[in-house]
Amino acid sequence: MTSAPLSLSPAAARGRRNLLWARLLRRATPWLFTLPAMAFVAMFFGYPIVQNVVMSFQEYTTSTFYSGHAPWVGLGNYVTILSSYLFTTTLVNTALFTVGSITFQFAIGLALALFFKRNFPLSGFLRSLLLLPWLLPLIASSAVWKWLLDQESGALNQFLGLFGIPAVPWLVDPTLALAGVIGVNIWLGIPFNVAILYSGLQAVPKELYEAGALDGATGWTAFRHITWPNIRSVVSIVIVLGVVYTLKVVDIILGLTGGGPANSTQTLATNAYNKSFVEFDFGQGAAISNVLVVVSLVFALIYLFISRREPHE
Amino acid sequence: METARKRHGKAPTVAVAAVLVPLTLSACGGAAAGVRNTGPLVIQDYYDELRDPLYQACARRTGLDIQVNHIAGPGLIPKVLQQSSSRTLPDVLMLDNPDVQQIAESGALSPLSDYGMHGEGMTPGVVKAGTYAGELYGLAPSVNTLSIFYNKALFKAAGITKVPRTWDELRATAKRLTAPGRYGFAMSNINTYEGSWQFLPFMWGNGGTEEDITTPETVQALQFLVDLRNDGSMSKSSIIWSQDDVIDQFIAGKAAMVVNGPWQIPALRKQRDVDWGTFTIPTRLASQTTVAPLGGELFTVPRTGDRARMADAGRFVKCLVSPEQQLETAKVTQTVPTNPEVAERAAAEDPAIATFVTTVRTARSRTAMLGPDWPKAATKIYNGVQLALTGKAPPAQALRLAQGEGAAR
């Protein structure tokens, strides 16, 4: 008699424990499915970022590679870069470069997308030609542009010369150089804008235009009240992604001017590159790129906010 | 040659290296030590096949089996950093001379005195370039420096019979040689180390110093370049020209006098359009001596952990920098032997390099004063030159502004 409750209670306990396990497993299942993704993100995004943050607090130089020794300098690197006369210049240049590039890339991209929406002979062929700047290696296109923009023998100045305009020092004059670099970057960014905006325009139901036309909405009115509200989500995504891509542009600037003349085209990104890979001061380079990461992060959050809000509209 | 040209575009390797450092450090820490590797002696440089016969000659003389790895210029330092963190450095490593002290500082190189080399019979500038903290880490068979190449036909046409010796004469000559579509003078004032290297003969020749770039001597030197630009004798584009762009202008007949180095001689001999000569870079006063920067690469013996192989590598380097090899190297690469007597013989054989032989005698290495901190000074120098030549600030203020960069450290 005494043994019965004894033998029963372990069984009951086991049953309860199994139940607990099952419930735990059920609750953990979704997490287990995300495990590969989390491991991937941690390894390829988390680790480098953490490493970059750590590096920015160290005096990390060429010696570190052999000795493995990187003295901790606290905020020293940040103090150095923030107090440098270059910091304001690079910050302003980054802002001008980004705003200038995005504004024109978007405006021209949208105009071209609207143009190509009406199908006409060869429009498909022309649209694919438009992708060309995107397909060329950046370093090749920057070399070609450097040659085109040359003051004395560049094709652009020779063309302008036909109209009696004297040679323009595109990449030599500190005030013009930034405009020149922005211009090339606009040329580079148009395909991206056209491609995305064009697909956004395709998704606008044709019936809306037909219905609108019956009510007298054509041309600008149709664009203002039918097209724009329908592509708004695409527009915001194009702009936010464009900003993030433009903030980190290095290759095109290095290829055209190397940040010069007199640092007039130096941005946060090119300055970080110079500090790390030309001067081999990896600590300061990391500090500047962390500033850039924070700026990009602000825009990434805006992107998240927009993409979360849109579906409920 | 010059560092800057070889320095861009090295991002990917270093980025990867930077990320991998902590991993490789723990993984490969002591693996190399004590293990006797039996393959051929590995030599790493950024030259091309032209050098191979020189290496082979020493391989025969020392009885060593060698394997030569040529790395593309800009990739060398990133590769070396990667190799030093994974303890896979080559047995013999060539380094551009301003990089030697930085790499020596990291502890990756072994002193050449271990192999019985003390730099005796070498131009003092070369020994200084290879010395860090009192120890000699690298030596070179031959070196280079900067001088001015001039177009003989244009000089003749302008009725100029003697080459300029002072800045005033240079300025006047440049003005006379300037014509529509042609500049009297050209040099590279680009915003890289290459631009600093080209400014040094004017700065040093006038007594300027990299320790403080705001001294009146350096201001005068920069003012001189600004004057040349204002005269219209030097193109405004000099601030975006590399040294190769400058020699292209010279060969195209668009520049009558250009600052450049002996490594351009083979290219100049290949073309038939321009009949050229060389002269040393003028100084402000006739009484001053030209002080140009010393260029060229040094051979070093990295600490690979294998004593026997390091001894072999030492023997090999000793052969590479021996007087007989120096003359051979100078002939193949159009450079100046590091032993002054051998240099005289080379100058007698080839008048084109005679000017460079003279200049090397008084040339200074860029790291002689600041050691591993030279890159920081070089950055300030090209920034100052650019600020002044773009007209953003007058020379004195430009140099003060540039000096301020990083002063908070």
Image (tube, grey):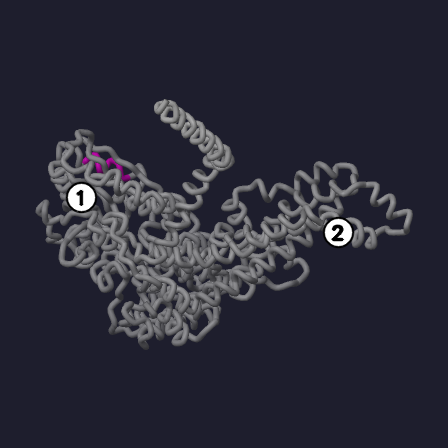
The three-letter code of the residue at mark 1 reads Arg
Specify whether disc 2 shares its chain with disc 1: no
Disc on res. B303:
1
Q: State which mark lies toward you, 2 or 1.
A: 2
Residue A260 on image: x %, y %: 47, 61
Q: Is B53 contained in the magenta span?
A: yes
Q: Quadrant of residue B131?
A: bottom left
Give the magenta-colored segment's residue range.
Answer: B51-57
Q: Chain of mark 2?
A: A
In this rendering, does residue B228 appear at all?
Answer: no
* Residue density around tag 2, few if under 14, some if 14–19, many if 20 or more, within 10 Å: some
Q: Residue at x 31, y 43 (%)?
A: B79
Report the front residue among A249 and B141. Answer: A249
Quarter of the figure that contains the N terminus of chain A: top left
* Residue density around tag 1, few if under 14, some if 14–19, many if 20 or more, within 10 Å: many
Residue A18 on image: x %, y %: 44, 29
Q: Tag 1's secondary structure?
A: loop
Residue B214 on image: x %, y %: 33, 74
Report the front residue among A245 and A259. Answer: A245
**Rendered position, B170 above or below A207:** below
**Relative to A219, B133 lies left or right:** left
Q: Chain of mark 1?
A: B
Q: Tag 2's secondary structure?
A: helix
Query: Magenta span: helix, strand or loop, mainly?
Result: helix
Marker count (numbered)? 2
**Relative to B51, A174 lies left or right:** right
Q: Residue at x 38, y 63 (%)?
A: A78
Residue A256 on image: x %, y %: 50, 54
Report the front residue among A106 and B371. Answer: A106
Circles 2 and 1, Cβ within 8 Å, touching? The answer is: no
Q: Is B289 contained in the magenta span?
A: no
The three-letter code of the residue at mark 2 reads Trp
